Image (cartoon, helix red, strand yellow):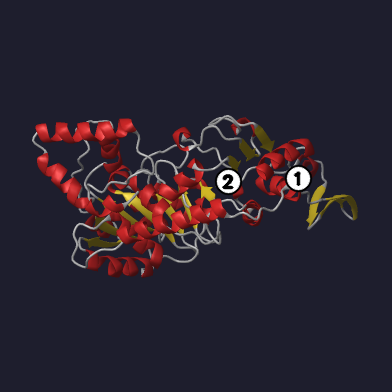
């Protein structure tokens, strides 16, 4: 489309950094294009009030989210000054946990115990770049300082006495000179030690006997993490695949972890992977797909073929809408309407021209994943995983405990005692967890 100036016979001449208008043969310089950088931070009085709280508190915990993108160094600096453990929200995982000696993992429904303990035992909470939605996992009765460039997000989840409107980078840069560097690291040392114990327990759950069948999903996620590229882009379906991604994928500053973490929409991984691969053709893109999610948008496998997109689809195939089943168990409801009668996903992938492999035993997993990742084109690995695997949250309410007991009783009375036995056998390894 021609610009208004061009329709009047004036040519627009673009030179890097400057714009010219030309009516041949003369050329007039109009104005330079200047690069600007905005600084968005709170006023000094608000910063000083927040600093006073942080300075008098002995057990500060930081909760960090996606707003920390581009501010990793600043986050590490203030955590070091405050001797504060850093809990990360799901969307903040890729920006927070890497190269972070203060990281203590996640909290919330898909988190684990060390993140929860760091929040539970703090005497001041600094929330940076997060709108963490799980109110039961936020502490009560402690002063809260929240940093967010979106003022309307502050105080939505928990009462905030010290709102700081600004970017994480600019706000921490301005706040740090007002913060007294702490020498007492007792709170930090206790929480990082707790994290090491919790991490060790989770890692033990990701081991498997060579002939085990079906596989524990933790093993699948940990193997994906180990074999994937250093700059891989991971897409996790809503439900259990997101839990295993949160607990077993390690970020390093180059990897990405993308999902429907705000809206919780099913079947998000494969279409998001198509967009990621199309925009980043040189990077490895791997989905952690649920069998229910893949089945909802099965036709997108043809899109991979049509667009020649080398996405690697790993299916956590447990024959059920298992996260829905978990919610039903917690509510005391006998599982109903959650069975999936799945086709052979690997055969479907092969039929549309993709690499396809099925994994039913643990000793088949690594070879299948290596072959799929090395394949020059789209690939699908259908991994049969345990249906009754429980993803236990770091805090179980009395209502959830009652609901689970009611579910077990109702299931037995309905003739489903074998399901309870299988549930116990599948999760026997987790009995030692806190």
Mark 1, Cα crowd under 10 Å, few <14 / some 14-19 / many 20+, is few
Q: As drawn, is 42 to the left or to the right of 265?
A: right
What residue sits 45% from the left and 63% below the top? 284
The residues bearing labels 1 and 2 have C-alpha atoms spaced at a distance of 30 Å
Mark 2, Cα crowd under 10 Å, few <14 / some 14-19 / many 20+, is many
Q: Quadrant of residue 219?
A: bottom left
Q: Is residue 396 visible?
A: yes
Q: As drawn, is 413 to the left or to the right of 191?
A: left
Secondary structure of the residue carrying tag 1 is loop
- Identify the residue under disc 1: 39
Percent x, y of residue 32: 85, 51
Q: As drawn, is 49 to the left or to the right of 19?
A: left
Percent x, y of residue 36: 78, 49
Mark 1 touches mark 2? (CB < 8 Å): no
Circle nearer the N terminus (1, 2)? 1
- From the image, which quarter does the N terminus lie in? top right
Examine the rendered structure and indicate whether residue 169 appears above or below residue 220.
above
- Identify the residue under disc 2: 59
Q: Is residue 95 visible?
A: no
Examine the rendered structure and indicate whether residue 362 appears above or below residue 71.
below
Percent x, y of residue 395: 38, 40
Q: Which mark is residue 338?
A: none
Q: Nearer the viewer, residue 389 or 381?
A: 389
Percent x, y of residue 335: 20, 35
Q: Nearer the viewer, residue 3 or 216?
A: 216
Q: Nearer the viewer, residue 133 or 86?
A: 86
Q: As drawn, is 307 to the left or to the right of 71?
A: left
């Amino acid at each position: 489309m021609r610009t208004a100036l061009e329709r009047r016979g004036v040519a627009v001449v673009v030179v890097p950094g400057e714009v010219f208008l030309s009516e041949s043969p003369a050329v007039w310089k109009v104005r330079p294009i200047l690069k600007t950088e905005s600084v968005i931070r709170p006023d000094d009085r608000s910063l000083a009030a927040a600093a006073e709280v942080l300075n008098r508190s002995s057990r500060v915990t930081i909760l960090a989210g996606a707003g920390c993108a581009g501010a990793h160094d600043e986050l590490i600096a203030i955590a070091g000054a405050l001797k504060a453990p850093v809990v990360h929200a799901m969307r903040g995982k890729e920006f927070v946990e890497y190269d972070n000696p203060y990281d203590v993992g996640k909290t919330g429904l898909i988190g684990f115990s060390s993140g929860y303990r760091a929040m539970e035992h703090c005497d001041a909470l600094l929330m940076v770049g997060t709108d963490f939605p799980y109110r039961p996992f936020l502490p009560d009765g402690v002063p809260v300082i929240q940093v967010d460039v979106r003022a309307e997000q502050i105080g939505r989840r928990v009462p905030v006495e010290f709102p700081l409107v600004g970017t994480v980078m600019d706000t921490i840069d301005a706040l740090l000179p007002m913060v007294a560097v702490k020498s007492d690291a007792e709170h930090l040392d206790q929480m990082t030690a707790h994290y090491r114990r919790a991490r060790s327990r989770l890692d033990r759950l990701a081991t498997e006997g060579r002939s085990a069948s079906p596989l524990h999903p933790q093993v699948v996620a940990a193997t994906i993490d180990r074999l994937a590229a250093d700059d891989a882009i991971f897409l996790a379906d809503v439900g259990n695949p997101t839990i295993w991604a949160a607990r077993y994928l390690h970020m390093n500053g180059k990897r990405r972890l993308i999902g429907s973490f705000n809206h919780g929409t099913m079947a998000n991984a494969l279409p998001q992977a198509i967009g990621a691969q199309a925009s980043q053709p040189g990077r490895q893109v791997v989905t952690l797909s649920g069998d229910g999610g893949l089945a909802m948008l099965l036709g997108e496998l043809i899109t991979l073929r049509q667009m020649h997109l080398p996405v690697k689809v790993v299916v956590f195939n447990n024959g059920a809408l298992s996260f829905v089943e978990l919610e039903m168990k917690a509510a005391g409801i006998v599982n109903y309407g959650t069975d999936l009668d799945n086709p052979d996903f690997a055969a479907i992938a092969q039929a549309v021209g993709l690499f396809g492999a099925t994994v039913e035993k643990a000793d088949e997993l690594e070879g299948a994943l290596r072959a799929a990742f090395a394949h020059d084109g789209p690939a699908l690995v259908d991994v049969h995983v345990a249906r009754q695997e429980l993803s236990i949250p770091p805090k179980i309410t009395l209502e959830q405990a009652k609901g689970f007991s009611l579910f077990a009783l109702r299931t037995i009375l309905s003739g489903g005692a074998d399901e309870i036995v299988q549930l116990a056998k599948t999760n026997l390894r987790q009995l030692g967890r806190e």
